[in-house]
Amino acid sequence: MEVKKTVVKITCELSGKNFSPKKLKEDINDIEYDNYVIEDEPFGSKNGFCSVMIPDRFYLEGDPIGWLADFVVKNKKIFDKNGVEDISIDIFWRNGEIFFTKEEMKSLARMKLDVSLSYYIY
């Protein structure tokens, strides 16, 4: 009996000392943020963080990891310009083992980023 993965959510976490999610949204107007966005200026230095969501249609079309890889690679220079210093990918799933196809693994590798895998237990 094969248990298929059920991906709950995939996010791309962006952060940096001089990063502003608001300014990034001006440069990439179709970007969608999760509810978690931080812009703050402790001790006079600006620190920013945001969690980028994959549009729902890419989950339905079956290639959210490919979309995310294209998004990160295409926008890397814009991220750099806006002060993004750290980028990581979080993949959350439930219902058994997670299995990545060769194409998904190539997409993950193409981004050259850290990937966090989190399993939901229900």
Image (cartoon, rainbow, N blue to C red):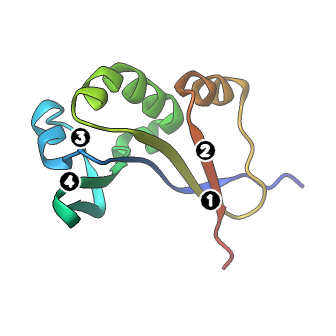
User: Gap in Å between the C-alphas at discs 2 and 3?
Assistant: 20 Å
31 w.r.t. 11: above or below: above
Q: Nearer the viewer, residue 27 or 96?
A: 27
Rendering coords of residue 89 (x, y %) = 52, 45
Residue under label 4, please give it: 46
**What residue is shown at x 52% (from left), y 35% (from top)?**
65
Q: Quadrant of residue 107?
A: top right
User: Gap in Å between the C-alphas at discs 1 and 4?
Assistant: 33 Å
Q: Nearer the viewer, residue 56 or 78?
A: 78
Upstream in the sequence, badge 2 or badge 3? 3
The tag on residue 93 is 1
Q: Residues within 10 Å of mark 4 (few under 14, many from 20)?
A: some
Rendering coords of residue 1 (x, y %) = 90, 55
The tag on residue 115 is 2
Q: Are marks 4 and 3 in contact (CB under 8 Å)?
A: no
Q: Residues within 10 Å of mark 1 (few under 14, many from 20)?
A: some
User: Gap in Å between the C-alphas at discs 2 and 1?
Assistant: 13 Å
User: Gap in Å between the C-alphas at discs 3 and 1?
Assistant: 23 Å
Mark 1 vs mark 4, foreground winner is 4
Q: Residues within 10 Å of mark 3 (few under 14, many from 20)?
A: some
Upstream in the sequence, badge 2 or badge 1? 1
Q: Quadrant of residue 38?
A: bottom left
Rendering coords of residue 102 (x, y %) = 72, 25
User: Gap in Å between the C-alphas at discs 2 and 4?
Assistant: 25 Å
Q: Is residue 55 left or right of residue 6?
A: left
Upstream in the sequence, badge 4 or badge 3? 3
Upstream in the sequence, badge 3 or badge 1? 3
